[in-house]
Amino acid sequence: MGDLSVNNSIFSSRDGSDPPSVPPCMSVDKVLPALLECFGIILCGYVAGRTNIIPATQAKGLGSFVSKFALPALLFKNMVLLDFGDVIWPFFFSILVAKVTVFFFVCVLTLLVADRESRFSKAGLFSIFATQSNDFALGFPIVEALYRNTHPEYLQYIYLVAPVSLMVLNPLGFALCEVQKRRTGEPQQQRKLRVLGSVLLQVVKNPIVFMVVIGVISHFLLGQKIPPFMEEFLDGLANSFGGAALFYLGLTMVGQLKKLTRSTVVALILLITAKLLVMPLICRGMVEVLDRGSRSSMNHTSLSNYAFLYGVFPTAPSVAIYASHYNMELEVVTSGMVIGTFLSAPIMYVSAWLLTIPWMDSDPLASALQHVSFNISIISLLALVWSVAVMLLSRKFHRIPHIFTINLFVAQLLACVGMIAWIFMAEQDNFLGQVLTFTLLYGSLYSTFIWPGESFEFVCSITSDSTPLNTTWSTQHQQCASTSCLLVEDEQKETDRQNTDIQSTRHVLVCLLLTVSLLANLSSCLWWLFNKDPGRLYLELQFFCVVANFGQGLISFAFFGLDKHLIISPFKKRLVSLWQGWGQEVTGSAASEEIRLTCTQFLTYHKEQCVRDIVHKKRCGERSTTETFLGSDLVRWLQSVGLSSGPGDALAYGSRLLEGGVIQHITLQHSFQDQALHYRFT
């Protein structure tokens, strides 16, 4: 379980023999450039979308080209050229069984825990998310860089395995989405027949599935050769897929993480765990079972490692298209695609690196594991001291569920202390000291997996974290006749609700992340228990467990170490004050002219229509009313009438109106924000 006291024999085969060496021509030198190439193109797409160089409408056109022309041509070409004689079919069936297993596991779990109003659509889309990989745009370059010189036949497995999702599993997910669609919006007459027909139509209309079938048929009709008159045409379309698909992936990432809520984040962590942790482990395990005894030991080990690497490939962007088509769970799918893609990069690189290095002696490996544990414990200890101090100074420690959180921090802190002490104590001949240090280390470590359960029991039902704020305002009489403004009270209630949601979300996330760590520890034990030769990837899992166990303080610091009222808000106010002062000195005249032009344009051509559309008379006191609008309403209105191209542009436009004195907050205490804050025209 990531133990530092583990015997050195874990780094060799369990029968005492040295594990097989990897051929020296396999090199990781080409893996890093392949990763940099892929993620560099993704970054270019993200920048293009973020700066609005390519608007969302044009991005959809690029996505249509990739999914309906470039990828079908690539699949057709490679299905015609595929050499079925070199295929190791146990590997194919291992990936098939692994995908089916994860698909039904996610599907059944979602059906059990999701709400009745959307459980079928969630089950369908989440199952597709966990099983459909970005095989061609992102996975193929990595496999090519790693196996081109040693196992070139592995490249064709990408094209052979990809249709498993497209032709077998995705139709099942579509069927569940259609069931939900019929249950919520249409009559129940002939429902089963219509659902079946709709699903079959979706499959037949999919150009990717259609071209795979045509490619397999052409493989036998054309004798595994592409006619000369078609070759250059197919090459032109197929070669355009890689860069265009990665660029489109970057475009689709813009603005997705802003849509996260507490419920979506919980689902997101579970889905990413299923895709990046459960899937590769099951893929490798199924190869170990189905291919055992059918190939040489070296080839068998190589296949199982390849299966693990294949399982790490992130989710394909096409899943977001499915979610958009059904208008269901778009926030979870798109955000998960973004996070999963960037989390997969270090996992793929480390996995590839471990597969290419010669097998090391057990002593250096154990020493490296100890150094990692010692270093991460020191960093985590400093983060935990800070987090505990913030918890005490903010006076949250006496509230539920923070009372459990502070105990978790103490347990994590003691685990780090125990790890640091063990490094020094293990070298001394002091049996009693070693026993006490070992007890402290593992007693604290295992208690870190118990306290989150206590916190999770209260987090969704008790909302005692909101901090009372003053709701009586030194400027309110200027805007409202009442001494106690009801609109300000509404804003405060909304702020308190958001703070409560944020706090409960933090606790849920910590609980889920520690559960993932616990799952990794369990996988480490099972891997060692059922494998005679754990292999190099087991070492990667060991390092992950060490970082997850003794780096818990970094998770705690990320969620609780930066208190909003104690640290973030004062720092933000100071930074904004300095930035505004510097900006006025440097670009004061240009900024003032832009504000003046914006305000003049708005007052002349748009104010009257805006007042009619979004301004409403609202009660602000027991016997007084005022005409106001919400900041979020103005942001949507500016986009609807074409004055801004997106939420960010609309927010900047509203800020210029506020700075120019056209609008103001009812209490003059807030800048313009895309929130449920009340503003009025001056």
Image (tube, helix red, strand yellow):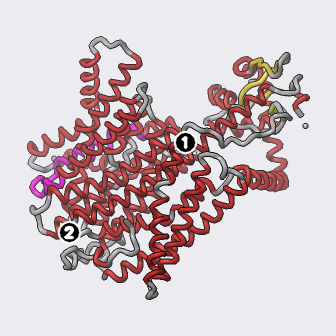
**x%, y% of residue 241?**
35, 48
- Comparing 275 with 74, the one in front is 275
Query: Which amino acid is tagged 1?
Result: Phe
**x%, y% of residue 319?**
38, 39
Residue 581 vs 296, above or below: the answer is above
**x%, y% of residue 599?**
80, 33
Provide the secondary structure element on which disc 1 rests. Answer: helix
Name the residue rendered at 32%, 44% in the picture: 132
Q: Is residue 199 left or right of residue 41?
A: left
**78 falls in the magenta region:** yes
Q: Is residue 586 left or right of residue 563?
A: right
Foreground mark, 1 or 2, reads: 1
| Residue 41 shows in the view | no
- Residue 532 numbered mark, or none: 2
Graded by Cα atoms within 10 Å as few (under 14), some (14 to 19) or many (20 or more), the crowding at tag 1 reads some
Dot placed on the residue nearer the N-terminal end, 1 or 2:
1
Q: Which residues are magenta?
A: 62-91
Provide the secondary structure element on which disc 2 rests. Answer: loop
- Comparing 364 with 276, the one in front is 364
